[in-house]
Amino acid sequence: MKSNQRKVRLAVSGLLLAAVVATGIFAYNQDHAKEEQAKAQQEEVKDNLSESTEEPAEDVNTSNADADLPENETAETSPTVTPEVTATPEPTEAPSETPAPEAGQTATDTVLPNLDFNENTVLTAPMSGISGEVLIPYSMDSTVYFPTLDVYKCSPAVVLAAEVDTPVAAVAKSQVVSVEETAETGLTLTMDMGNGYQAVYGQLKDVTLQAGDTVEAGTVIGNISEPTRYYVKEGSNLYFGMTKDGASLDPTEYLALQAE
């Protein structure tokens, strides 16, 4: 009886020992497998890291290209310059053309009047009802007396007696050269009669003509004014002179002075 119980105990002990050994072996195998798996993962990670650190050939070229660019710029980030497009201006209207003169017509013909004064031209009287009294004669060869100034000197024109407000007319077809105010002859009108001849009218008022205006012979160009301080004693008058190419002429040789 006791012998059988002892065998049973030995058998149970053997089974327990076997179970413990088997459990230990199984646990060992599991731990070993885990270690192997962990090593394999570590190796795989190392392989991936080594591959990622290697630079491919095309990356080397990119790096070289980047080295030639300015600092903080790369080939990929360098801005692209867009060419500026200049807007083409819209065409403007062509200026109107000035019509050309007709055939045979010159610019001179369209601007200058036909002035043809000569020694044979008959002058129109500058004043109607002129008295013919010459207050101061023309004289460039010798001196004559000027009452107001109380001096003797040459006279390049004739000073004709005339009442204030008497109309004064152009002695020939003329073009106005100048209209000016002088201390000696007051409002003075110089007119071109053509061929170098000019007429000078002084002591005037109410002149409306301007330089460039053209008038026919006998056209009223102004009225007699009060005399300037150079002709107080002589009284109101018409200062009338003539020139040829700037040289003084005796107006009495071209103008017949008639008495009333």
Image (cartoon, grey):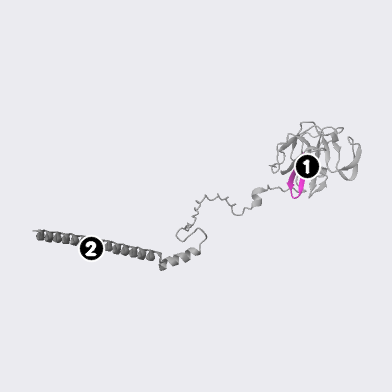
Rendering coords of residue 30 (x, y %): 25, 61
Q: Which residue sits at x=74%, y=45%?
A: 192
Nearest to the observer: residue 161 or residue 78:
78
Q: Report helix, strand or loop for mark 1.
A: strand
Residue 122, above or below 131: below
Q: How many marks?
A: 2
Residue 116, above or below 238: below
- Does the stretch in magenta take in 91? no
- Does the stretch in magenta take in 198? yes
Q: Which residues are magenta?
A: 188-199
Rendering coords of residue 8 (x, y %): 12, 59
Quarter of the image containing the N terminus? Answer: bottom left
Nearest to the observer: residue 252 or residue 149:
149
- Our reading of the magenta stretch's main secondary structure is strand
| Crowd class of label 1 (few under 14; some 14 to 19; many from 20; radius 10 Å) | some
The residue that mark 2 highlights is 25
Task: Name the amino acid, label 1.
Answer: Val
Q: Which residue sits at x=27%, y=63%?
A: 33
Label placed on residue 224: none
Rendering coords of residue 164 (x, y %): 79, 31
Q: Are marks 2 and 1 in contact (CB under 8 Å)?
A: no
Horizontal side of residue 125 vs 5, given as left or right: right
Q: CA distance from mark 2 to mark 1?
A: 151 Å
Which is more foreground, mark 2 or mark 1? 2
Quarter of the image containing the C terminus? Answer: top right
Q: Report helix, strand or loop for mark 2.
A: helix
The residue that mark 1 highlights is 200
| Crowd class of label 2 (few under 14; some 14 to 19; many from 20; radius 10 Å) | few
Horizontal side of residue 233 vs 71, given as left or right: right
Task: Name the amino acid, label 2.
Answer: Ile
Pick whichever of labels 2 and 1 is earlier in the sequence. 2
